[in-house]
Image (cartoon, rainbow, N blue to C red):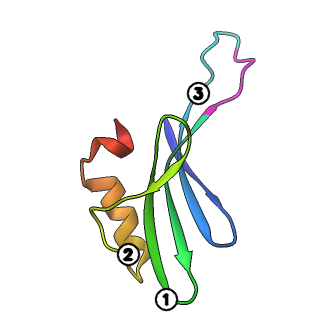
């Protein structure tokens, strides 16, 4: 498994990537969104969102928005909340 991110104009999506499942390696890596961080220009804050089973994102209510993206990344990595890594 590896972790990647997709960067857009005002958000960053964290993805869990798994190697091809077939023994011939003909399929591509599977990419599943885990979390998304949105930036609000007006406030200068990053807000953390989690993904549900229908691939929709919802605001994560247990961490306040922060001017530091690193605070959100550290929370996803170290909080142990199964909403991100199951």
Which of marks 2 and 3 precedes in the sequence?
3
Q: At 51% from the left edge and 51% from the top edge, which residue is drawn?
A: 57
Q: At 64% from the left edge and 9% from the top edge, which residue is drawn?
A: 23
- Residue 42, x across and y down, in percent: 55, 90
Residue holding disc 1: 43
Mark closer to the observer (3, 2) = 2
Between the residue at mark 3 and the residue at mark 1, the CA separation in whole angstroms equals 39 Å
Numbered disc 2: secondary structure: loop
User: Do the residues bearing badges 3 and 2 touch, measured as CB atoms within 8 Å?
Assistant: no
Mark closer to the observer (3, 1) = 1
Q: On screen, 23 above or below 71? A: above
Residue 26 counted in the magenta span:
yes
Q: Residue furthest right?
A: 26
Residue holding disc 2: 65
Numbered disc 1: secondary structure: loop
Numbered disc 3: secondary structure: loop
Q: At 54% from the left edge and 36% from the top edge, which residue is drawn?
A: 54
- Residue 8, x across and y down, in percent: 68, 65
- Residue 45, x across and y down, in percent: 46, 82
Residue holding disc 3: 19
Which of marks 2 and 1 precedes in the sequence?
1
Numbered circle sitting on residue 58: none
Which of marks 1 and 3 precedes in the sequence?
3
Between the residue at mark 1 and the residue at mark 2, the CA separation in whole angstroms equals 10 Å
Image quadrant holding the C terminus, namely top left
Q: On screen, 28 above or below 48? A: above
Alpha-carbon neighbours of circle 3 within 10 Å: few (<14), some, or many (≥20)?
few
């Amino acid at each position: 498994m590896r972790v990647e991110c997709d960067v857009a104009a005002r958000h960053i999506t964290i993805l869990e990537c798994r190697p091809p499942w077939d023994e011939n390696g003909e399929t591509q890596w599977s990419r599943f969104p885990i979390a998304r961080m949105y930036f609000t220009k007006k406030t200068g804050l990053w807000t953390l969102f989690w993904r549900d089973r229908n691939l929709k994102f919802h605001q994560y209510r247990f961490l306040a928005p922060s001017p530091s993206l690193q605070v959100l990344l550290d929370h996803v990595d170290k909080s142990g909340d199964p909403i991100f890594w199951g």
